[in-house]
Image (cartoon, rainbow, N blue to C red):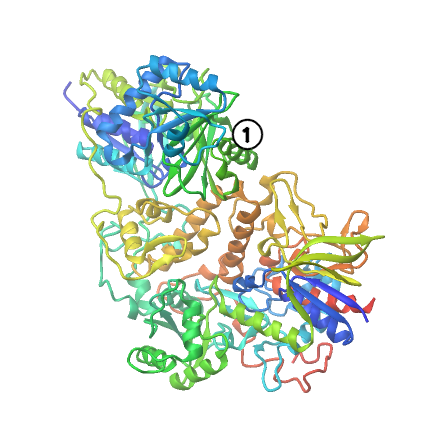
C-alpha cells in the first residue's frame, strides 16, 4: 500500500491515548483530539489496576486482567504503585470462593489471617477474620495518560488538547471531513479571546519576567498573555476512532449515528482519612464489591458497580454517597467518622447485554450502520485499556491491510515529568493557600506545563487536588498565580472554570460540616469578594483606562460624610432625619 | 424584671441583647455565645441591602428599596420605620464619646474587594472608609510578600480598569518574620506591640518606610487587614502621618481582623451594659403550654439550666452552624424549630456554584412578630428569631445578611422586654 493511513482518535483519556500510541507505534499517522486538557477527565475514576482475583465467576476475564496488570507493571512502572490488594468479606464462604477462583486463574494469591492481617492493614474491621491478598496496584491515571500520550508523540502522533469535534461529514456512506475547533477557554469573556503576541504558545516566557512588583496596571494589560483565540480547521482522516467514553454518543451523533447504549455512572468518593496501605476490596453478602484505596494521601472509596444515569444527569446522589460510605465502613470502620470531601462521577457506556465492568465492545459503524470510517469503543477499563487499544488497532490495521504486530506491551512508557522542564523547584515564597501545600513557583511551573492554564490540570500536575468546597476558598489565590504573566481576564476565566468543575463534585456531599464550610465559602466568594457580580469583570477597554463600570459612583457614599458626624446628640433617635442627611 | 435569654452572640444576638437592655434597663439579659470564633469569617461591615431582584446594579439607598423585596422579607415584616430606628440604634452602638468606629450615611458605599471587585456596604469600619471606590481619588495598594491572600497588582489592575481614578500597587516584605500561616494575626500583634525589627526600628515605622518608595501622589494607601487588633486606631494614624496619606484595609475571606474587631466592639458593649455573656450551647429546652421555661446548656465545664421569660434564637444560618444539614433535611438544632427542606437533596443547590442556592435561603419560617412558626402557628409563644436562622430569602445574594441581623436583632430585643 503506497500511503500511510491517517487515523483520528477522539478522546484524551487512557483509552484514547492508548489507541493513539498503539497505532503510532505500528506506523500509522495519528491525530488525537481531546476536548479538555489531556488526562484531566481520567481522575474521576478509582485508579486501581486489578489483578483479576476479584473476578471469580469469569476465568477468562480474570486471566485477562492478570495478564494486563503484569504488562502495565512492566511498561508503566513509573505510574504504578504496587500496593497489593486485600479482598475481604464478612462471609467466610465468599472469601474461600475468591481464593479458589484466583487459584484457578493462576493469579498469585495468599490467605492472610489474624495478626498478620492486622499488621498489613490496621484499619480493617475486627469482624474481618481473613483476607485474600492479591497483586492489585494503584495507578495515577493522569500521569499514565500523560506518559501514554508522550509515547504516542515519540512515534509521531499529533496530540491536540482543548480541541472539540464540531462536525463529521458523511458522503455516500463513508466518513468525510471532520471539523475541529480549538478553544482553550470555552465560555471565556469575549475580551479574553484575542490573538496572542508571542507566537501562540502559552507558557513561553515573553517580555521581562520578575518585574511584577513594579508593573503598572496599564502596562500589564498590554503585555500580559491572553488565551489563544478559538480557531477552527478541517481534517480529512482515513479512519476515526471514537474513544470519548461516556460521551461517545455525542460524537457519534455528529455523523448522524446512534449508539443505542446506556450511559452508566461510577462514583468515587474522596474521604479525609488516612489512606489504607493497600487496595481493600470488601465483598458484601450480596456479592457487591466496594473498594477502599489510597489516593494522594487520603482515602478513595469506589465500587465496581455502575448505575444507569437518571434524568438528573451524571452526578452522584447523596444516597449513592451514603451507600458507598456505609459499605466501605463495614470493612474500615474508622471511615464512618470522617468527612467525605468530594464525589466524582465517571461516565461510560454500557456494553449491550453486559455489565459495564471490564467488558468492551467495538461498534464498527461500517458493519453496523453502513457508514464506513468510524469505530466507537464502548466500555473498557483502566486495567484493560491497553488490551482494548490493541483490539482497536488490530481492527483498524486490518481494514487498511497493514500487518504489524502490537508492541505496546513491550515498549516501556517514557518517564514523564508533569511539571515539564521546571521540575526541580526550590522556592522560599510561601504556600499559596492553606489547603494546598504548593508554592507560587510550583504553581507557575504547573500552569506553564499546561497547554492552556487551568487550575484542575495544574493541581493534577502538582500531584494534588482540591477536596471540599471549603478547601477551595483559596482557589482565587491559585488563579492569581497566573498574574501578571497572564491577563487578569485569564485569571478570572480560569477561576470561574475551576469553580464550575469543582462544584459538580461538591453538590452530592453537602451535609453537616461539609455543608457548613461550603456555605461559608459561598458567602466568602459572593459577599466578601463579590465574585457573583458581573460588574467586576465588566467592559474592559483596550487601553486599560476608565471604562464605565456601569455604576454611577456619585450616587454612593464616599466615606467622607457620616451619619455620626452630623448627629447632634449621641442618644437621640430620630426617625430618618439624620439618615437622609 | 424580665429575663431574656439570647442564644447566639453574632451580630444579631448582640444587637438583640443591647436593644433589650436599652429598652428595659432593669431586664436581666443573658447571651449564650455558641462559637464566637466565627467572627473571623465576618467581613466586619454591616451590609443592609446591596442588590434587589428588579435592579441590575447595586442599590444606592437601601431604605428606599425594601419595597421591592417580598412581603415576607424580614425588612418588610419589621417595616421601614423600625428598620430606620434599628439602623440608627446601630450607630449608637458604634458611637464612642469622641468619634465613631464605623461610618456611613443613608446611602450605600462601594468598597473594593480582594479580587478587585466592588461591593455595596452600608456601615463600614473607619479602617475601610478611606478605601471606598465610591470616593474617587487615586489609590495605592500594598501587598505583602508572604500573604498570597492579596495580589495587590492584580487587584489594582482590575480596579484601575473599572474606576475613574488611578489605582497603583506595590508588594513589600513585612518588616518582621512570622512562623504561623497565614500570618495575619502575627503581623497584627507585631504592629499592636510595635516590636522592633532586626535593625532596631519599630515595626510600624519600618513598614511605612518599605511602602514609601513606591508611593507617588496617591492620597490613600490600602493594606491587607493586618493593622493591629487592640491598637488599631493608633497604628493607622501613625502610618497615615508617616505616609502622608489616608490608610485603609482591604478585607480578605478568612481570617478577617475587621470581623474580630467587630466582635471585640460588640462584646465590650455587652459588658458595659451589664449583660452576661456565657460560652455555651443549648442541649435541651423545657417548655410548658407552648412557652419555654428554661434551657439546659453545656458550658466548657458544666451543665446548667437557665430560666427566662423570653428567648431569642440567634444562632445564624447554615454557614454559622445555626442550621445543620443532615442528608435528608436541614434542622435547627437548638429549639428544634421546623425548617422546610426540599424533597430531594439535589435541590439544595443549583449547578451554578455562586448562584441562588436553597441552602443559602434555608431557615425557619417566622410570623410578623419574628416568632418561629410551623403551619399550626408559633412553635413557642416566647421565642423570636433573629438573622440568618430566618429562612426564605438569600441574604448573601441580597448583601443584606448583617443588616438583617441588626434589624431583626433590634426588633427582637425590644419585643423580648415589651411583652
Q: Is residue B235 left or right of residue A67?
A: right
**x, y percent for residue A41:** 38, 37
Give the letter of the chain under mark 1. Answer: A
**x, y percent for residue B346:** 58, 40
Q: Quadrant of the N terminus of chain A?
A: top left
Residue B162, compared with residue B343, is above or below; it is: below
- Asked whether residue A504 is in view, the answer is yes
Find disc 1 in the rendering and name its residue: A310
Q: Give the residue drawn at x 77%, y 53%.
A: B286
Q: Give the residue drawn at x 57%, y 72%.
A: B264
Q: Is residue B259 left or right of residue A281?
A: right
Q: Is residue B227 left or right of residue B291?
A: left
Residue A33, compared with residue A100, is above or below; it is: below
- Asked whether residue A556 is in view, the answer is no
- Within 10 Å of the Cα at label 1, are there few (<14), some (14-19), or many (20+) other Cα atoms? few
**x, y percent for residue A458:** 33, 48
In the image, B344 versus B193, the foreground residue is: B193
Q: Secondary structure at mark 1?
A: loop
**x, y percent for residue B31:** 68, 66
The part of the image, by quadrant, that contains residue B400 is: bottom right
Q: Quadrant of the C terminus of chain A?
A: bottom right
Residue B293, compared with residue A122, is above or below; it is: below
State the residue lying farthest toward the front. Answer: A115
Amino acid at each position: 500500500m503506497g500511503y500511510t493511513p491517517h487515523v483520528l482518535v477522539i478522546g484524551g483519556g487512557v483509552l484514547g491515548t492508548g489507541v493513539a500510541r498503539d497505532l503510532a507505534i505500528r506506523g500509522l499517522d495519528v491525530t488525537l483530539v481531546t476536548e479538555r486538557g489531556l488526562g484531566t477527565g481520567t481522575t474521576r475514576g478509582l485508579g486501581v489496576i486489578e489483578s483479576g482475583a476479584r473476578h471469580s465467576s469469569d476465568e477468562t476475564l480474570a486471566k485477562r486482567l492478570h495478564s494486563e496488570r503484569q504488562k502495565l507493571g512492566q511498561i508503566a512502572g513509573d505510574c504504578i504503585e504496587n500496593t497489593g490488594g486485600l479482598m475481604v468479606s464478612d462471609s467466610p464462604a465468599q472469601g474461600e470462593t475468591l481464593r479458589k477462583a484466583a487459584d484457578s486463574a493462576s493469579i498469585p494469591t495468599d490467605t492472610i489471617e489474624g495478626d498478620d492481617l492486622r499488621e498489613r492493614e490496621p484499619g480493617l474491621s475486627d469482624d474481618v477474620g481473613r483476607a485474600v491478598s492479591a497483586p492489585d496496584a494503584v495507578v495515577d491515571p493522569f500521569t499514565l495518560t500523560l506518559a501514554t500520550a508522550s509515547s504516542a508523540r515519540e512515534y509521531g502522533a499529533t496530540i491536540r488538547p482543548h480541541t472539540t469535534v464540531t462536525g463529521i461529514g458523511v458522503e455516500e456512506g463513508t466518513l468525510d471531513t471532520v471539523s475541529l475547533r480549538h478553544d482553550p477557554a470555552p465560555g471565556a469573556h469575549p475580551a479574553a479571546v484575542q490573538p496572542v503576541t508571542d507566537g501562540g504558545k502559552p507558557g513561553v516566557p515573553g517580555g521581562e519576567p520578575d518585574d511584577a512588583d513594579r508593573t503598572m496596571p496599564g502596562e500589564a494589560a498590554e503585555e500580559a498573555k491572553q488565551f489563544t483565540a478559538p480557531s477552527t480547521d478541517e481534517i480529512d482522516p482515513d479512519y476515526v476512532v471514537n474513544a470519548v467514553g461516556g460521551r461517545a454518543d455525542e460524537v457519534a451523533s455528529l455523523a448522524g449515528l446512534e449508539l443505542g447504549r446506556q450511559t452508566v455512572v461510577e462514583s468515587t468518593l474522596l474521604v479525609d482519612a488516612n489512606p489504607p496501605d493497600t487496595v481493600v476490596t470488601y465483598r458484601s453478602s450480596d456479592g457487591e464489591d466496594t473498594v477502599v484505596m489510597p489516593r494522594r494521601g487520603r482515602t478513595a472509596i469506589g465500587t465496581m458497580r455502575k448505575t444507569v444515569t437518571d434524568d438528573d444527569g451524571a452526578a452522584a446522589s447523596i444516597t449513592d454517597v451514603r451507600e458507598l460510605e456505609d459499605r466501605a465502613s463495614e470493612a474500615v470502620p474508622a471511615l464512618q467518622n470522617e468527612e467525605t470531601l468530594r464525589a466524582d462521577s465517571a461516565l461510560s457506556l454500557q456494553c449491550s447485554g453486559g455489565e459495564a465492568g471490564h467488558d468492551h465492545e467495538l461498534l464498527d459503524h461500517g458493519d453496523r450502520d453502513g457508514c464506513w470510517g468510524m469505530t466507537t469503543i464502548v466500555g473498557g477499563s483502566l486495567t484493560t485499556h491497553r488490551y482494548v487499544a490493541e483490539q482497536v488497532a488490530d481492527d483498524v490495521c486490518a481494514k487498511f491491510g497493514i500487518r504489524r504486530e502490537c508492541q505496546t506491551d513491550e515498549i516501556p512508557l517514557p518517564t514523564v515529568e508533569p511539571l515539564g522542564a521546571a521540575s526541580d523547584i526550590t522556592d522560599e515564597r510561601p504556600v499559596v493557600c492553606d489547603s494546598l501545600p504548593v508554592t507560587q513557583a510550583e504553581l507557575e511551573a504547573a500552569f506553564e506545563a499546561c497547554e492552556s492554564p487551568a487550575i484542575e490540570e495544574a493541581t493534577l500536575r502538582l500531584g494534588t487536588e482540591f477536596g471540599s468546597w471549603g478547601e477551595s476558598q483559596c482557589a482565587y489565590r491559585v488563579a492569581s498565580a497566573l498574574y501578571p504573566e497572564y491577563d487578569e481576564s485569564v485569571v478570572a476565566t480560569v477561576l470561574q472554570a475551576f469553580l464550575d468543575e469543582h462544584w459538580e463534585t461538591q453538590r452530592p456531599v453537602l451535609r453537616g460540616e461539609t455543608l457548613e464550610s461550603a456555605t461559608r465559602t459561598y458567602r466568602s466568594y459572593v459577599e466578601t469578594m463579590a465574585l457573583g457580580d458581573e460588574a467586576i469583570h465588566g467592559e474592559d477597554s483596550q487601553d486599560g483606562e476608565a471604562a464605565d463600570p456601569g455604576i454611577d459612583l456619585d450616587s454612593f457614599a464616599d466615606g467622607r460624610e457620616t451619619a455620626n458626624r452630623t448627629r447632634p446628640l449621641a442618644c437621640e433617635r430620630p426617625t430618618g432625619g439624620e439618615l437622609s442627611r | 424584671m424580665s429575663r431574656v435569654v439570647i442564644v447566639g452572640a453574632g451580630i444579631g444576638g448582640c444587637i438583640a441583647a443591647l436593644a433589650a437592655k436599652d429598652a428595659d434597663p432593669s431586664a436581666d439579659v443573658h447571651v449564650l455565645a455558641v462559637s464566637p470564633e466565627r467572627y473571623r469569617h465576618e467581613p466586619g461591615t454591616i451590609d443592609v441591602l446591596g442588590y434587589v431582584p428588579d435592579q441590575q446594579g447595586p442599590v444606592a439607598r437601601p431604605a428606599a428599596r425594601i419595597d421591592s423585596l417580598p412581603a415576607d422579607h424580614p425588612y418588610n415584616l419589621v417595616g421601614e420605620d423600625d428598620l430606620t430606628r434599628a439602623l440608627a440604634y446601630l450607630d449608637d452602638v458604634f458611637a464612642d464619646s469622641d468619634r465613631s468606629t464605623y461610618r456611613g450615611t443613608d446611602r450605600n458605599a462601594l468598597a473594593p474587594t480582594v479580587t478587585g471587585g466592588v461591593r455595596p456596604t452600608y456601615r463600614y469600619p473607619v479602617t475601610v472608609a478611606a478605601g471606598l471606590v465610591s470616593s474617587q481619588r487615586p489609590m495605592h495598594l500594598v501587598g505583602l510578600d508572604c500573604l498570597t491572600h492579596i495580589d495587590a497588582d492584580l487587584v489594582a489592575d482590575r480596579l484601575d480598569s473599572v474606576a475613574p481614578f488611578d489605582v497603583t500597587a506595590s508588594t513589600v516584605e513585612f518588616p518582621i518574620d512570622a512562623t504561623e500561616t497565614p500570618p495575619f494575626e502575627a503581623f497584627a500583634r507585631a504592629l499592636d506591640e510595635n516590636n522592633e525589627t532586626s535593625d532596631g526600628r519599630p515595626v510600624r515605622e519600618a513598614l511605612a518606610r518599605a511602602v514609601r518608595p513606591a508611593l507617588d501622589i496617591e492620597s490613600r494607601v490600602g493594606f491587607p487587614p493586618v493593622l493591629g487588633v487592640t491598637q488599631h486606631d493608633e497604628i493607622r494614624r501613625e502610618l497615615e502621618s508617616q505616609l502622608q496619606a489616608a490608610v485603609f484595609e482591604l478585607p480578605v475571606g478568612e481570617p478577617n481582623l475587621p470581623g474580630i474587631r467587630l466582635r471585640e466592639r460588640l462584646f465590650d458593649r455587652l459588658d458595659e451594659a451589664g449583660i452576661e455573656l456565657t460560652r455555651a450551647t443549648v442541649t435541651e429546652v423545657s417548655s410548658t403550654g407552648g412557652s419555654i421555661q428554661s434551657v439546659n446548656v453545656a458550658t466548657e465545664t458544666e451543665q446548667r439550666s437557665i430560666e427566662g421569660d423570653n428567648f431569642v434564637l440567634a444562632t445564624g444560618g447554615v454557614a454559622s452552624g445555626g442550621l445543620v444539614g443532615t442528608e435528608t433535611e436541614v434542622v435547627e438544632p437548638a429549639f428544634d424549630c421546623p425548617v422546610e427542606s426540599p424533597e430531594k437533596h439535589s435541590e439544595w443547590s443549583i449547578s451554578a456554584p455562586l448562584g441562588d442556592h436553597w441552602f443559602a435561603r434555608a431557615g425557619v419560617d417566622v410570623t410578623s412578630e419574628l416568632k418561629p412558626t410551623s403551619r399550626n402557628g408559633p412553635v413557642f409563644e416566647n421565642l423570636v428569631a433573629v438573622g440568618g436562622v430566618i429562612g426564605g430569602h438569600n441574604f448573601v445574594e441580597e448583601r443584606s445578611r448583617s443588616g438583617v441581623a441588626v434589624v431583626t436583632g433590634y426588633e427582637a430585643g425590644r419585643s423580648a422586654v415589651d411583652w
